[in-house]
Image (cartoon, coloured by chain):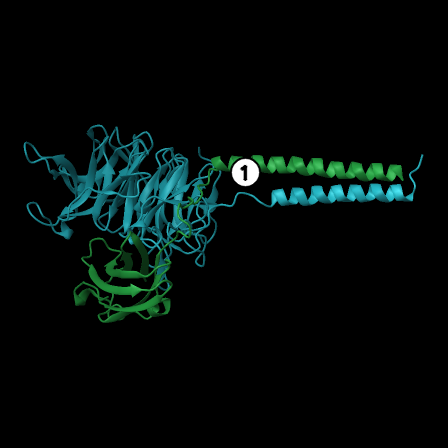
Chain colours: A cyan, B green
Amino acid sequence: MRANRPQRLARTTAVLMFAAFLATGCSDASSVPIQPAAPDSSNDAAPGLGAGVRPLSFGPGEKGYVSFHPSEERLAFVVDGYAAEKTLDAQRFERRTEEDFDAAGVEWIAEDDLVFVGRKTAGENASEPEDGDSLFIARRGDGEDQRQRLVEISPGVQATDSLPGGGFIAAVPASEAPDGAGLVVFKERIKPSPGTVRGRVLGVSASPDGSEAAVAVSGSEGDVELISYDLKEGTARRVAQLSGGEVLGSPQWTEAGIYFVAREDGTAPYTLYRVGEGSEEPEQVEGVGEGFLPAGIEASPDGEKLAVVGRRNASSPTDLYVLTLDSGTLEAVTANKNMEIKTEPRDISWTPDGSGVVLVARVVLPEPAVYDAPARSLAPAFYNLYLAPVAGTR
Amino acid sequence: MRTFAFWLLGALAAFFVTAGAFLFLANLGSDLGRSDPIPQQPQSATPNAGPALAVRFSKSRLKELESSTEQTVRLYVQNLSGEEIPQVDLSLAVTSDSTVQELRRDYERDLTNLASGERRTVEVEVDLSPPLPAESQDPDTGLGAEGYRKIIEARANAAGGRSAIRTAVLP
């Protein structure tokens, strides 16, 4: 039985109406997603470092030298020459050193104690910049005087670095060797390593288990030596010697050998090198690509990744990268469009669980910028801390 | 003809049933909006609520500012409320992005009888010279060796908690 022409026309019309209704209804429903909040210049929602990167501090003041508390809830840092600390999500931070102290660094030593790297600039025990930095710990006064006082625990500190599980390692002058240094681990208690390192320590980092250290030492003839140091036995093994070269920051102890940034002379660009286990010959790290310009580096808490601040090439913006050491793959963690990222070695820091890296950055300002918020609430206008999540972790 | 009417009525019935179903689902969706994880702007209890005051910098004049004394900052203060504001206190604070650099210079102006909708131009002469000793300044820019950024924070306050703020950051 076949339908006649009016019937076919009616059926066709109905089907078309229904199809049109479904089509317009469905498309309308799918075109009204929940709109994300519009970027607002007042809260600096778009700092220009890429998706997922969020500010951890706000307001004026040049921040740097970040040190995480092992709980991940707090972090300490240096602001314009004084030490400060804050909980991770708090907007404000607490000042921990006074005007008479010039802080160069800060390290967590225990649950609530910080050790400050720096020097007194006024009053009793004031020192000159050429005297170098010392280690100080904050102690509360006795009796009625409960004010916090800084007590020097080691003069002439040469280098420090945070330990992955809390505490830190420091290179301090060795009393038994005037031209050498001793390595001391500060954790629940102070634990000097036996033996000394000959020369002045330029940089130091420890293995995740705290049993070994990678040390850069300046020799008497201007050479730089890289040393793998057994902290329990106090024995040193030279892994590389750089004649006339410069090392930037601390060499990093990793599961895949010691990584460091160096250049042959004062004008050449820096290069990322690696010295494998049992080798004495540094090799350029190929995973970063030809022409890569590294600056600050830091090994992840498990020693399996390396955070690198650098540029893909001379015309690329500075970004934070993570090098996975076993595969040699390099991934960009930030997507910098208009930010100045600080490149000093201690201006990046892994979170204790290795899920992110804190860096310091501010927006590039070729001309005046206007914001509809007070200065203390602004992040990108000034050097502030940013947490960049690292893919593939937690 | 009966068959034609049958199909037409069937099509219309299908249309309304489906339309009803979609309307029902749409209303369900609007109910879910109450648990929207993205916070919505709270509804004001008063009609036409919004900022009663606005303060803005003249951006072209900001670009002309130099790091020295006798610099003129031009601002616009506007009454966005529906009534005259008898007095507006305008304050400017010049600071720097260095928290240890002892630079804070405050300036104040009073604006009276700002009519509803009126935008008034205010010029304030400020000192943007660095507080550092002259020998540590860059002879070309007049800035300190570190090139601190200058901050000009403008606040307009009026009775009844009406206020506005703008911050200019100079490179």
Q: Name the residue that disc number 1 marks.
A: B30
- Tell me the residue at 19%/64% (across/down): B136
- Residue nearest the observer in this picture, B74 or A140: B74
- Quadrant containing the C terminus of chain B is bottom left
For residue A193, above or below residue A373: above
Residue A185 lies left or right of residue A392; in this view the side is left
Q: Where is residue A8 in the image (x, y as percent from the top left)?
A: 87, 42
Q: Where is residue B113 in the image (x, y as percent from the top left)?
A: 29, 64
Residue A33 lies left or right of residue A77; in this view the side is right
As drawn, the residue found furthest toward the front would be: B83
Label 1: chain?
B
For residue A51, above or below residue A353: below
- Tell me the residue at 48%/36% (across/down): B34
- Category of crowding for the residue at label 1, using alpha-carbon neighbours closer than 10 angstroms: few (below 14), some (14–19), many (at least 20): few
Answer whether residue B64 is visible to the viewer in this image: yes
Query: Quadrant of the rendered structure where residue B118 is?
Result: bottom left
- Residue nearest the observer in this picture, A186 or A266: A186
- Residue nearest the observer in this picture, A30 or B128: A30
Q: Position of residue A170 (x, y in %)?
A: 23, 38
Query: Quadrant of the rendered structure where residue A213 is?
Result: top left
Answer whether residue A182 is visible to the viewer in this image: no
